[in-house]
Image: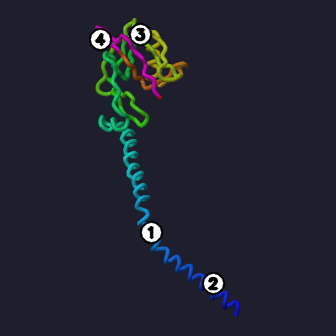
Amino acid sequence: MSSTRNVMGAIALCAALGAGLTACGPTEDGAAASSSKAPSAAASAPASAAPSAAAKPSKGAKGGDAQGGENDCGKPPTLPAGVKMIEVGLHRDISVVEAFDAKPKCTPNDWIYHGEGDPKGYKLPTDIKAELALSAGPGQYKPVTREELSMHIDGCLSQDHRNIKEPFGCYGNVYEITLNAKGEIATMRERWSV
């Protein structure tokens, strides 16, 4: 008899729990629906923000066009008057380089300069004022002779980094230049980047 009571008690308990779960299910759903308006609105705000945040890196990862770049990296950098950015593509001898005009491109990290269009020949006069970027970080340069500049350009273009010794490194062959009255490169400073 006591085992029958225990079985009946267990069935009653299960029925009560089952009824409670059934009763709680729709009520909780209804309560969740009415009380979830605030949380779902809060939850939807980050969810709606997430796609736009995800869209930004994808544009930057593609390099971005002018409009996409502005959205990703901010306003493109502008150079001071008289300063031009080039990417050296060929170095035939100590006195001449062929280079592309380098334009800013938005990347996931920030703006970088990349050569575009047809290359143009530039003369490197003997009295050129050249500086190479130091591997210690941005804003640190060392003046070099035209011969040292030439060897550095050759080593970086050929990717023969055995010839590029500390404190120097190769950073994409991008240089800030100014031209003299003859159209020759008067100053040439290597652009440091990671």
The image position of residue 50, as x and y in percent, is 41, 49
Query: Which residue is found at the position 48% from the left and 73% from the top?
Result: 25
Which quadrant of the figure has residue 74? top left
- State the mark number for residue 183: 4
Residue toward you, 121 or 61:
61
Q: Earlier in the sequence, mark 4 or mark 2?
A: 2
Q: Earlier in the sequence, mark 3 or mark 2?
A: 2
Above or below 174: residue 16:
below
Above or below 109: residue 93:
above
How far apart marks 4 and 1 lie (CA) works out to 77 Å
The image position of residue 113, as x and y in percent, is 37, 27
Give the position of the N terminus as an image quadrant.
bottom right
For disc 2, the marked residue is: 10
Q: Earlier in the sequence, mark 4 or mark 1?
A: 1
Which quadrant of the figure has residue 66? top left
Give the SS element for disc 4. loop
